[in-house]
Each structure stands twice: as C-alpha cells, then as structure tokens.
C-alpha cells in the first residue's frame, strides 16, 4: 500500500503523510469510475461546461491559497505559482467556452446516402498520471477536455504533490463533478500498471520521464489502450546574427531559471554564433549570479529549491560529470549548504557530442551554451538529440527566423519567444518527447470516439 509524503524542499522537513490505497481500494476506485461514466456522459454538454466554468472561477478566487500550497509543496516561487494557477483556471474556462462547439456533430458530404454524420463521443474511464513540476497546469490540460467530453477520470498525481491533488479534487467536486467521475488516487507503480491493464480503463495520459512513459506505453499497447505521452525535452534555442543579443540573453536566462529549470520545455541548449558567444555567455552568467535564491514564499525570490534533495543532487552530479568530461563551468553548479534542495545556477560551454550533457535532459537551473559557425550548423545541432518537444529561433528578420524555425524537428517551434503555452494552442512533441497532443481542439480529440453514423436512402 503506497503512501505519499509531502516534504517541504525549502526546509527539508516532512509536512504531511497520506495513506495509499490497498488493492481493495483500487478495485473500488475502478468500479466507481466505470459505473459513473454512463451518468456523466449523459449529462448535457452545457451542464458539463457550466461545471468547468465554476472550476475556473474557483482557481481565480483561491489563487493566493493555491499558489502558496505548491510553493511549499514543490518549491515554485510565489509569483510563478500565481501565474500557474491563473493558467490552469484559463484552461478550464477555455473548454467551458469552446467545448460545446467542439463536440457538435459534423455533417459530411452524404456521398450517395441520405446522411453521413460524424459524432464525437466519450470512450469511458481514463487514467491520468501527472508530474510534480506544474501540479495545477498539467492536471488542467488533461482533465478539462476529458471531463468536457464526458469521460470519467482516475488521477494519479506525483507522490510529493498529494496535498495539492486533494485540493484540486475538492474544487471539481464543489463545482459539480460527481465524486465517482473524478477519483484522486494514491497508488503505487505496480497498482497503476494493474489499473492500466484493467478492461474498464479505456486510455491513459502521462506527463513525466522517458522511463515512465516507455513503461506506460508498453503496458497500454499490450492491452490495446490509447495513450498520450508528454515526456522529456532538451529544447534548443537558436540566436541568429541579427538578434538583439543583450535583450535576448536576459530573456533566455530568466526563462531558464523559471521553476528552477524544472520544465520539460525550458530552453536548455542555447545556440549562438561564434562571434557573439562570449558576450552572450557573460550576460547569462550575470543574470544567473544576480538571481535571488531562497524561500519561494518570499516574493523577491527568483529561484527556489529543486523539488527534492535527491533531484538537486542528481543535477549537481550531471554538472560535475560534464566538467569531468571536459566542459567549461562558468558559474555555479554546486549544492548550497544547509537545509533544503538549493543549488547555484550553472552555465556550461564546450559541451561536445562525446559528453553525456550533450544529449541528456538536465532538469534544473543549468544552461548549456554552444557556439556555431552557421545557421546550418545551428539547425543540425538543434536536431541532433533524441528529444523533440519544442525549440525557438530569435532574430529581427522574421521571415528568415521563420524559415529556420520550420527546420526544427520539434512539436512546437517558436520565433522570438520560447515555451509559450495557452489553452487554445496544441502542446506536445515528437521523437522521445512523446506523442499525442494536449490543449485546444487537439486535446479534445485524443480520447474520444469519432463515430460515423451513415444513413442510407430508404
């Protein structure tokens, strides 16, 4: 029976422990979600939309409380946490507004029949496996479209985010989601695997690591279940010769430090022309060294702790290994003494193909900066990793920057911004960054039955 533990990464103290479900509890959760599906799918679409609208209102009304909770739970600086709460609320509101239209039947050319109609119908109970780095946002982008579509949901959040997962469930219940249509799970990995295999489950969505994604995809595929995976990223960011170097370097450095670098679509590999490299590195180093580290509840803090001491130590080890293999460390990289999971943000250059840091994801406040001799070399370097979540190109000649962005082998390519996520935009990657899409109309289309109803002429 898996227990969940909330440990404050700022202090290192355990704040709360949560009992996990036993096997009988797992079976009960499956039965409840399965039994609730006919009622929830039969709830009129406008009523489901009204439920999501009330959930969005709750996120707006409780934004300070919710932000402080995850600042304590996983270390996100308060201003960034407030932004995440607002984004989550906007996702529920977007689907409340646009969901009914997305579910409308579509009339096709009859093609010799009286009618050819495409209907969009829910498929049944789904499992969502969510990470700790964006507790509200990640849940919203899976839950909002699928509740809107009429599916029921079993939600397994990360073990360190049990408190926020319970609050999210209560928000949905208060908004009008039946308690059996959304079930919050505290289960082990083995229990989760058994649940995915259960014939009552129709699909699974996971946001997490490559290893977890591969295990879930293998299990889902073996049992012929639909899956959507959003996995790791090692996002490239290409700076062109005509970019405003100082401005771009400061924007990019700040973005890399957001959430202590713990974002799959953070700009992790910064690719700059050789002649601009020294100036670019100097500015990034300046931003990193001037960033305020500390308690995420302090509104003046720029960088909080990593999610855990173990996570922090893993990133520190990656930096040390890169240096041992020949990379140049310009600043930071060490763990801070004392309580909590803090480390000094690090800047690396001279990372080559032979080094682990060239292709692996570094999930922390570390910038790897490369110098290149041409745009072709920049694109080749950008695509020469197993990931393909997102990437960006920065320059003042927009048409040229767009042409370069079109050459990136990613699911999301940006020009003069990086990692923008909005409710109506598709989110997802290619290669080892996963498959499927979330958000917008694309997120509504993953776990539905696109059913043809064709009526012949009498």
Image: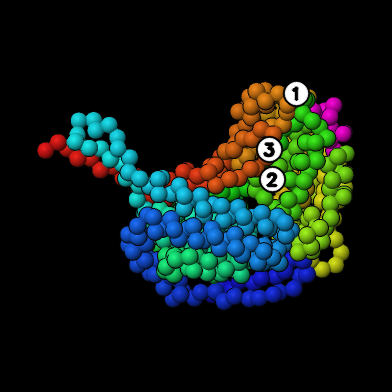
Of residue 108 and residue 379, the one placed in the foreground of this image is 108
| Mark 3, secondary structure of its residue | loop
- Whether residue 321 sits left or right of residue 101 in the image: it is right
Q: Between marks 2 and 1, how big is the CA–CA gap?
A: 24 Å
- Residue 279 belongs to magenta span: yes
User: What residue range appears in magenta?
Assistant: 273-281
Closer to us: mark 2 or mark 1? 2
**Residue at left offset 48%, top offset 58%:** 52
| Label 2 Cα neighbours within 10 Å, binned few <14 / some 14-19 / many ≥20 | many
Of residue 433 and residue 439, the one placed in the foreground of this image is 439
| Mark 1, secondary structure of its residue | loop
Please indicate, yes or no, whether residue 228 appears anywhere in the rendered image. no
User: Where in the figure is residue 289, as x and y percent of width and height?
Assistant: 87, 49
- Residue 82 belongs to magenta span: no
- Whether residue 458 sits left or right of residue 173 in the image: it is left
| Label 1 Cα neighbours within 10 Å, binned few <14 / some 14-19 / many ≥20 | some
Q: Residue 404 shows which numbered tag? A: none
Residue 95 in the image: above or below residue 153:
above
User: Where in the figure is residue 191, as x and y percent of width and height?
Assistant: 49, 67
Residue located beneath label 2 in the image:
266
User: Where in the figure is residue 458, as x and y percent of width and height?
Assistant: 11, 38
Of residue 241 and residue 52, the one placed in the foreground of this image is 52
**Which colour scheme appears in the figure?**
rainbow
Please indicate, yes or no, whether residue 267 appears anywhere in the rendered image. yes
**Residue at left offset 22%, top offset 37%:** 115
Earlier residue among tags 3 and 2: 2
Earlier residue among tags 1 and 3: 1
Residue located beneath label 1 in the image:
374
Q: Between marks 1 and 3, how big is the CA–CA gap?
A: 21 Å
Residue located beneath label 3 in the image:
417
**Which quadrant holds residue 58?**
bottom right
């Amino acid at each position: 029976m898996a227990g969940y533990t909330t440990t404050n990464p700022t202090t290192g103290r355990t704040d709360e422990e949560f009992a996990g479900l036993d096997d009988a509890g797992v079976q009960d959760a499956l039965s409840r979600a399965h039994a609730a599906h006919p009622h929830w799918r039969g709830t009129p679409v406008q009523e489901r939309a009204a439920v999501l609208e009330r959930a969005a209102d709750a996120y707006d009304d409780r934004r300070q409380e919710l932000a402080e909770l995850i600042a304590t739970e996983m270390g996100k600086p308060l201003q960034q946490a407030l932004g995440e709460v607002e984004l989550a609320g906007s996702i529920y509101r977007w689907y409340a507004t646009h969901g009914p239209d997305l579910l409308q039947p579509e009339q096709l050319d009859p093609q010799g029949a009286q009618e050819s109609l495409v209907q969009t119908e829910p498929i049944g109970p789904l499992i969502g496996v969510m990470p700790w780095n964006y507790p509200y946002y990640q849940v919203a982008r899976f839950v909002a479209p699928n509740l809107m579509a009429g599916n029921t949901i079993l939600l397994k959040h990360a073990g360190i985010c049990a408190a926020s997962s319970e609050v999210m469930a209560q928000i949905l219940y208060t908004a009008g989601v039946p308690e059996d249509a959304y079930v919050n799970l505290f289960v082990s990995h083995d229990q989760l695997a058994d649940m995915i295999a259960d014939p009552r489950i129709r699909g699974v969505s996971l946001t997490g690591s490559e290893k977890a994604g591969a295990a879930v995809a293998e299990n889902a595929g073996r049992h012929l279940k639909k899956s959507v995976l959003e996995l790791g990223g090692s996002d490239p960011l290409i700076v062109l010769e005509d970019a405003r170097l100082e401005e771009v370097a400061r924007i990019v450095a700040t973005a890399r430090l957001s959430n202590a670098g713990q974002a799959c679509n953070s700009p992790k590999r910064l690719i700059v022309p050789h002649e601009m490299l020294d100036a670019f590195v100097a500015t990034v180093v300046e931003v990193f060294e001037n960033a305020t580290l500390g308690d995420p509840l302090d509104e003046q803090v720029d960088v909080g702790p990593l999610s855990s001491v173990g996570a922090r130590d893993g990133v520190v080890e990656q930096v040390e290994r890169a240096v041992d293999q020949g990379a140049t460390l310009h600043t930071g990289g060490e763990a801070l003494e004392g309580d909590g999971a803090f480390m000094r943000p690090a800047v690396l250059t001279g990372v080559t193909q032979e080094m682990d840091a060239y292709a692996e994801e570094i999930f922390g406040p570390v910038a790897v900066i490369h110098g290149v001799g041409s745009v072709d070399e920049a694109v080749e370097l950008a695509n020469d990793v197993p990931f393909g979540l997102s990437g960006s190109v920065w320059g003042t000649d927009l048409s040229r920057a767009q042409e370069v962005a079109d050459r990136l082998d990613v699911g999301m390519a940006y020009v003069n911004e990086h990692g923008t996520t909005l409710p109506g935009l598709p989110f997802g990657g290619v290669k080892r960054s996963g498959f499927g899409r979330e958000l917008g109309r694309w997120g509504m289309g993953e776990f539905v039955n696109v059913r043809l109803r064709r009526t012949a002429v009498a």
